[in-house]
């Protein structure tokens, strides 16, 4: 299931990250890659607020669709 | 004045060669680089150990280039001179963002003795990824485990000793904001350099294969497991999260943002700042200083022409600008508080939805907010935008926000023509936003480019903005403002005074319209007629505005000092001879939306990447300013006064031509777009 | 006499202003900003 469809407030393990290589690598360095945990904090103003490894990030719909979660 | 931008590349190369030569000649001055994640506290540390006042903002992209300075004497161990280089934040050596590229290029290319890797104590595991890469460079690394105060406050525990053992390098806990641990850090750094030990890289599985990064992460996780104990889960809802729910709310977010901005600008322009500026302008530079100067000079029996040059030209012009100093100081104080607390990232989140409609992402709001102080760092802040087209578009639109230098113009015209209404100044910002939206939409139609914006932005935790930092920023800006006034503006004013007092034959003239300035202004003046601006004086003022926007005010002061004894900014003062309230508003808009000062144009040139785009940008900006002013004058005069303004006929003709060209350009772009789509489909 | 003294002083001031203005314009992208505006920090072109 892609991140954009995930339930708020829940923690998931990432299954894979799709999309352009540059972005996959960037997300990787933040700690978003297969096997790592990601928590969906909330959805604000059309953007998803996620928690990856102790930090909060805002990502838009486009990016949220590229993160596939284990669920 | 030459475009700074045109000579920029050559100058940079010269500067870099000079630096290299200095380094070779200067012998073995130790060079230390500060590297680490964005928002980890690098620049705070940099400021603390060098005594500089570089800007610290709680949003990504504050530091877009490296900055160098010497270590403060109080931190130096044996009195030697040490050079510190602050690099932009990076998450890794393989760059995604342009800031990461600067970091990588610098560390790999320059001669660095020791790297201080600033690790964010609030997010150690993410920081360590970069650390493991830095360790592989062979240069000794000392880790500054920063934000130790936050670590303690949260109740987390990090074993610095264990971490040091795992990494194979020294680890010093620090808190840059309170300057704790910094002397130990520097001592350790010098020790490490002297011991000449080679930095050993760490081993982990899958090295040098495709899965290297994964192996690296696993190593980091292992290390974290041994050294860090967290007191709470990161995914728990924090206070910051709760605030975000309101501040970045789908419907509340935007109004809240406007409210805050309105508050900041009104407080600066109409409130405290305006009040103090009023005093400066009316009393200090309106009466006290000129009267004293005149009295003094007359008593000495100075030649009246020289007296006029000094009092009306130099003092008058500079005084007119410096009078607005309090206003600018208040604005920058407020902006600093706003930027320091971390709210800016939230603004980007709120604006993302709207910016997507014009093909940009929420990140583009940051250069614009920075631009409300000065367009130059605003334009530079576009470096955080990876997509070239989005970056260009943002660069074109950023100068639309009134910068600090335009404030005197706004304040002056508001005081003379609209003394009782408080809506004039804020309206400039509202118009700016509207034009950014419209301009953005227009640019999207006019230029053919793909826009798939992907938006990801870190949201740092809110923090109480540092008053000390804001005050330092405020005085810094004041210093800069006064310096600008006493150098470039003073020089310009003196020339202006001279140009309006003398004819081409170098004879003093009684009638200003026979002067050098008048003939120069008259050259340009015809272009301004459709806008309802009559007179060489207005053309001259607008022209000088390109050197520095404050000059518009200064030039008027100098030119009109001859015409009237009264201070410039009295309601109904000398300016009313040239404008009606409608054309005054129009003139304001014109100067705000035409291309910015040369220095800002230079910055635009650096960011645009090609001259073709620079000229397109300038053309666009000028057209917008011209078009807006034209419409306001012509239609405003018709609506409000029931008669046509000056230059009505040529204005209508120009309007028709512009509209036709616009339709043509859009059709051309559409055709190009369709052609590309067909190609895409068949491919 | 007064004219001469004041004139010289003024010329001195102008020369100082002019030299500084050129120095500012040549030394950084900030051009006329003289690297002292609050932006000097964000400007990052100002070399110490």
Image (spheres, grey):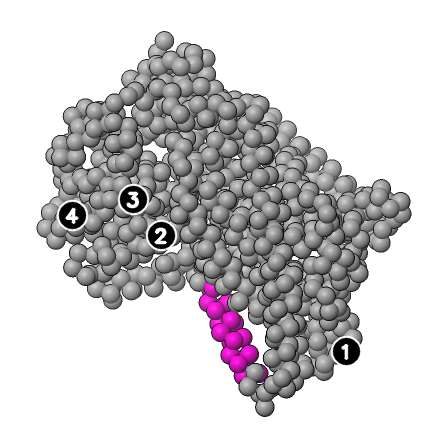
Predominant secondary structure, magenta span:
helix
Alpha carbon of mark 2 to alpha carbon of mark 4: how far? Answer: 22 Å
Q: Secondary structure at mark 2?
A: strand
Q: Which residue is mark 4?
A: B188
Q: Which mark is residue B178?
A: 3
Say which quarter of the image contains residue B444. Answer: top right
Q: Chain of mark 3?
A: B
Callout in the foreground (2, 1): 1
The one of B629 and A71 positioned closer to us in this rendering: B629
Alpha carbon of mark 4 to alpha carbon of mark 3: how far? Answer: 19 Å
Q: Which mark is residue B67?
A: 2
Q: Secondary structure at mark 3?
A: helix
Q: Which residue is mark 1?
A: B510
- Near mark 2 (Cα within 10 A), the count class, few <14, some 14-19 or many ≥20, is many
Going from N to C along the chain, the mark reached first, 4 or 3, is: 3
- Apparent side of residue A58 relative to residue B228 in the rendered image (left or right): right
Q: Relative to B631, is A26 above or below? A: above
Alpha carbon of mark 2 to alpha carbon of mark 1: how far? Answer: 52 Å
């Amino acid at each position: 299931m892609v991140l954009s469809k995930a339930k708020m407030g829940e923690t998931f393990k990432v299954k894979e990250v799709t999309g352009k290589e540059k972005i996959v690598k960037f997300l990787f360095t933040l700690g978003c890659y297969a096997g790592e945990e990601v928590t969906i904090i909330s959805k604000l103003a059309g953007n998803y607020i996620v928690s990856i490894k102790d930090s909060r990030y805002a990502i838009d719909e486009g990016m949220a669709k590229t993160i596939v979660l284990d669920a | 004045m030459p475009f700074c931008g045109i000579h920029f590349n050559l100058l940079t190369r010269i500067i870099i060669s000079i630096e290299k030569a200095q380094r070779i000649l200067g012998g073995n001055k130790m060079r230390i680089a500060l590297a680490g994640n964005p928002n980890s506290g690098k620049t705070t540390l940099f400021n603390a150990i060098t005594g500089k006042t570089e800007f610290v903002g709680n949003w990504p992209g504050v530091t877009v280039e490296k900055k160098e300075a010497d270590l403060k004497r109080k931190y130096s161990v044996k009195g030697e001179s040490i050079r510190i280089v602050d690099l932009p934040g990076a998450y890794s050596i393989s760059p995604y963002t342009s800031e990461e590229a600067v970091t990588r290029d610098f560390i790999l290319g320059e001669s660095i003795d020791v790297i201080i890797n600033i690790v964010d104590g609030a997010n150690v595991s993410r920081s360590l990824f970069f650390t493991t890469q830095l360790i592989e460079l062979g240069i000794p690394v000392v880790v500054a485990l920063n934000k130790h105060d936050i670590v303690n406050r949260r109740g987390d525990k990090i074993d610095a000793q264990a971490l040091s053992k795992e990494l194979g390098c020294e680890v010093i806990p620090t808190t840059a904001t309170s300057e704790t641990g910094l002397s130990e850090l520097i001592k350790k750094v010098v020790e490490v350099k002297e011991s000449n030990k080679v930095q050993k890289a760490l081993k982990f599985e899958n090295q040098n294969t495709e899965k290297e990064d994964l192996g690296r992460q696993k190593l980091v996780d292992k290390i974290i497991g041994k050294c860090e104990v967290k007191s709470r889960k990161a995914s728990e809802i924090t206070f910051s999260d709760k605030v975000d729910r309101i501040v970045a709310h789908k419907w509340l977010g935007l109004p809240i943002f406007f409210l805050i901005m309105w508050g900041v600008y009104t407080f600066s322009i109409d409130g405290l700042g305006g009040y103090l500026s009023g005093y400066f302008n009316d009393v200090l530079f309106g009466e006290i200083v000129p009267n004293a100067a005149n009295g003094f000079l007359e008593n000495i029996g100075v030649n009246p022409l020289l007296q006029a040059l000094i009092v009306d030209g130099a003092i008058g012009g500079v005084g007119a600008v410096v009078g607005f100093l309090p206003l600018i100081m208040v604005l920058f104080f407020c902006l600093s508080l706003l930027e320091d607390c971390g709210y800016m990232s939230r603004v980007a989140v709120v604006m993302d939805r709207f910016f997507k409609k014009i093909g940009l992402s929420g990140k583009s709001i940051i250069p614009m907010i920075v631009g409300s102080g000065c367009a130059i760092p605003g334009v530079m802040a576009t470096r955080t935008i990876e997509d070239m087209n989005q970056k260009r578009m943002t660069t074109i639109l950023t100068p639309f926000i009134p910068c600090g230098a335009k404030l005197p113009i706004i304040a002056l015209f508001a005081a003379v023509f609209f003394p009782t209404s408080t809506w004039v100044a804020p309206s400039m910002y509202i118009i700016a936003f509207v034009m950014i939206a419209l301009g953005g939409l227009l640019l999207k139609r006019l230029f053919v480019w793909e826009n798939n914006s992907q938006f990801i932005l870190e949201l740092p935790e809110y923090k109480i903005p540092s008053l000390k930092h804001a005050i330092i920023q405020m005085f810094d800006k004041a210093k800069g403002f006064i310096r600008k006034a006493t150098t470039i503006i003073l020089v310009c004013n003196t020339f202006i005074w001279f140009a309006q007092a003398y004819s081409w034959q170098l004879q003093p003239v009684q009638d200003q319209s026979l002067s050098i300035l008048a003939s120069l202004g008259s050259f340009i003046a015809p272009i301004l007629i459709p806008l309802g601006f009559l007179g060489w004086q207005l053309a001259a003022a607008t022209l000088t505005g390109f050197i520095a926007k404050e000059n518009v005010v200064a030039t008027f002061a100098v030119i009109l000092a001859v015409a009237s004894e009264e201070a410039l900014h009295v309601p109904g003062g000398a300016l009313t001879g040239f404008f009606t309230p409608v054309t005054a508003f129009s003139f304001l808009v014109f100067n705000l939306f035409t291309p910015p000062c040369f220095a800002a144009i230079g910055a635009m040139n650096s960011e645009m990447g090609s001259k073709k785009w620079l000229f397109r940008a300038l053309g666009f900006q000028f057209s917008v300013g011209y078009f807006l002013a034209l419409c306001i004058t012509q239609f405003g005069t018709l609506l409000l006064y029931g008669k046509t303004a000056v230059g009505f006929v040529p204005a209508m003709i120009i309007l028709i031509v512009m509209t036709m060209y616009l339709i043509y350009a859009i059709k051309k772009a559409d055709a190009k777009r369709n052609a590309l789509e067909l190609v895409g489909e068949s491919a | 006499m007064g004219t001469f003294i004041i004139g010289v002083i003024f010329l001195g001031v102008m020369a100082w202003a002019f030299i500084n203005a050129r120095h500012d314009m040549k030394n950084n992208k900030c051009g006329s900003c003289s690297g002292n505006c609050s932006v000097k920090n964000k400007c990052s072109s100002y070399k110490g």
